[in-house]
Amino acid sequence: MDRHDISWSGTITALVTPFTRDGELDEAAFQRNIELLIQDGVHGVVVTGHTGEFWALSRDEWKRLFRVAMDQVRGRVTVIGGTTDIATAQVIEMTALARELGMDGVMITPPYYVLPTPADIVAHYQAVSDAVDIPILLYNIPHVTGVDLTPELVLRLAEIDHVGAIKESSHDFMPLVAMIKTVGDRLRVFAGYSALRGLPAVSMGVDGFISVADTQVMGREGVDLFMFAREGKIAQARAIQYRCIRLIDALNRVNGTFPAPLKAAMNLVGRPGGYPRDPIQPLTAGQQQMLRGTLQELGLVEPPVAAGEARGG
């Protein structure tokens, strides 16, 4: 398998997992978010990724979200299941379920926390590929996992049968450029952090974005960012990129643990973000007020109505 054996492209959203204030799964909110994103024009969704707080889910909840997502999407867009775990056997278990349910592929980071060697990483992905016949999206996010999938290592991983794509989410831009240059002829390359670098990423040749805030807070604009960039409508894409950067700056400045600021922003604009799950705490009232100010400036929420205006005077 290589990039020509899969058709993924465009804007694919890494879904939040909405929880209630009491920490329960909010399936109705999860379904509504998927439906809104499909109406906005996204080309696919990722279930139970980093944004989806996979680490906070029980195995039964994880499986339930897979099933709910597939029932909600009903074949309208690409669905990729996040099946990251430390133990290879656990990754195989969830990847097999993704295959059974008819998902289009799975997204897998290298085993986190244990700091595996390159040989361990190759063996991990090889075992998953040997066990389950489904396309694999590699996921490189080294500041979270503690493991860097360098372009040279990814070249080795590209030799594995079912590896067909990679999401590059290093903090810096240059690793993305190096990944496109080194493996772009073998694998589909998707940019993380598209709200910060989507336009230049398209210019350098990515196949699409795995988006987070740009689509789940800004809706259709997040999809338009990719489409305008790909169509060469640079002025329009640049305008959206600047708006996305302002949003990300606001999310970072409130100093909450991801994805709490993202979920708060979604809630404030009327989209179903829900609450994070312990140990991550929701934003305080003061933090939400800070965030609301930027959302108002961006025209994503209405400013408060003055008392006199509310009385019609």
Image (tube, rainbow, N blue to C red):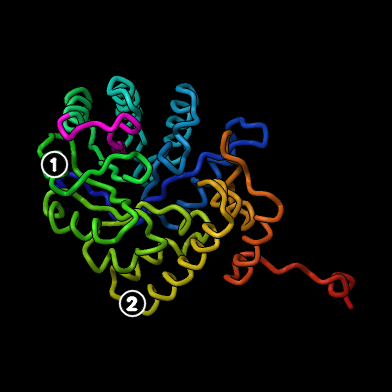
Residue 113 in the magenta stretch? The answer is yes
x and y percentages locating residue 37 in the rendered image: 47, 52
Element carrying mark 1: loop
Please rate how many residues cluster around mark 1, counting C-alpha atoms within 10 Å: few if below 14, some from 14 to 19, many from 20. many
Instruction: Name the residue beneath numbered marker 1.
Output: 158
Q: Main secondary structure of the magenta part?
A: loop
Q: Residue at x 30, y 28 (%)?
A: 99
Residue 277 in the magenta stretch? The answer is no
Q: Is residue 152 left or right of residue 94?
A: left
Query: Quarter of the image holding residue 165?
Result: top left
Q: Is residue 60 left or right of residue 102?
A: right
x and y percentages locating residue 58 in the rendered image: 49, 24
Circle number at residue 291: none
> Compared to 70, does 93 lie above or below?
above
> Compared to 114, does 226 lie above or below?
below
Q: Which residues are magenta?
A: 105-119
Answer yes or no: do the residues labelled 1 and 2 have beta carbons within 8 Å? no
The N terminus sits in image quarter = top left
Amino acid type of the residue that numbered disc 1 sits on in the rendered structure: Ala
Instruction: Name the residue beneath numbered marker 2.
Output: 234
Element carrying mark 2: helix
Amino acid type of the residue that numbered disc 2 sits on in the rendered structure: Ile
Q: Residue at x 14, y 51 (%)?
A: 183
